[in-house]
Image (cartoon, grey):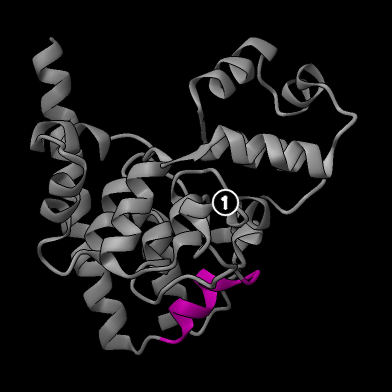
């Protein structure tokens, strides 16, 4: 979902009237021509707004929330359904073992929030049964295109559509898309650790079981892809 270029120009005029397009683009890590073309087309990607906000020293989330498509974007802690989807299965297995043995875990040992299969894991975590179909219908996507999208980092518009259809925090969608950091989205510093510690042994084992099955399918798919490539 993009932002109207006219609204972005009003933002520039209000907050940085003496800053050139070239300087804004350079601060955002993009070419002047790219930003100029986005403004000419009349639609500016949310990721451009975020990058320019950072360059201006503004909160990316608050900057994006000033525009009509994202007025409902507020700092939010992750939904309980989604937080452990930001944890890859090897780190999950180690952490659950430590919890069972009463060994302290740390947020740092839980690894990166993003891993090769993280998009699909997140969608599966927030899907009540018909989420993918709802998003495909909303965006006019073919199932094959959706499957391909879930094999990579989700684009922000697609992640936003998933979050809105699932009723999970919009801020987390931008974390999934790697457009906002957890801190920028409003997360606490130890969200995954606290979510794990809040689960009893039975819930931890169920989590390990479901994620292990999903990981097995992922590994099999990768191996088959390698075989097909020869």
x and y percentages locating residue 89 in the rendered image: 34, 56
- Which residue in the protein does label 1 denote? 67
Of residues 156 and 191, the one nearer the viewer is 156
Residue 213 x/y as whole percent: 15, 57
Residue 37 highlighted magenta (yes or no):
no
Q: Main secondary structure of the magenta part?
A: helix
**In the rendering, at what x and y percent does residue 155 appear?**
39, 38
Residue at position x 86%, y 28% in the image: 19
Quadrant housing the C terminus: top left
Decide: is 35 above or below 98: above
Residue 196 on the magenta segment: yes
**Residue 207 in which image quadrant:** bottom left
- Of the pair 112 and 34, the residue shown nearer to us: 34
Q: Is residue 52 left or right of residue 177?
A: right
Q: Is residue 38 above or below residue 59?
A: above
Indicate the quadrant where residue 148 lies. top left
Q: Which one is in front, 178 or 141?
A: 141
Identify the residue shown where x is 44% and y is 50%: 176
Image position of 192 (left or right of 159): right
Identify the image quadrant of the N terminus: top left
Image location of residue 224, percent across then percent down: 10, 27
Residue at 45%, 44% in the rendered image: 177
Residue 177's place in the image compared with 80, above or below, is: above
**Which residues are drawn in magenta?**
188-198
Looking at the image, which residue is at 65% across and 69% down? 189
Q: How many marks?
A: 1
């Amino acid at each position: 979902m993009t932002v109207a270029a006219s609204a972005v120009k009003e933002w520039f005029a209000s907050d940085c009237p003496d800053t050139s397009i070239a300087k804004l683009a350079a601060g955002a890590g993009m070419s002047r021509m790219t930003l100029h073309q986005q403004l000419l087309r009349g639609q500016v990607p949310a990721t451009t707004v975020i990058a320019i906000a950072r360059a201006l020293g503004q909160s990316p989330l608050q900057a994006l929330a000033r525009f009509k498509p994202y007025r409902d974007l507020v700092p939010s802690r992750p939904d309980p359904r989604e937080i452990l989807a930001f944890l890859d299965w090897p780190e999950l297995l180690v952490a659950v073992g430590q919890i069972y043995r009463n060994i302290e875990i740390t947020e740092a040992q839980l690894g990166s929030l993003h891993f090769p299969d993280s998009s699909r894991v997140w969608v599966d975590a927030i899907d009540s049964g018909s989420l993918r179909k709802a998003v495909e219908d909303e965006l006019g996507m073919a199932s094959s295109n959706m499957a391909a999208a879930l094999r990579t980092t989700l684009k922000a518009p697609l992640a936003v559509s998933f979050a809105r259809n699932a009723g999970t925090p919009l801020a987390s969608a931008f974390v999934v898309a790697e457009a906002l950091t957890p801190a920028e989205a409003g997360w606490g510093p130890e969200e995954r650790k606290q979510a794990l510690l809040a689960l009893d042994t039975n819930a931890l084992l169920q989590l390990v079981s479901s994620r292990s099955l999903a990981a097995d399918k992922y590994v099999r798919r990768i191996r088959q892809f390698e075989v097909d490539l020869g």
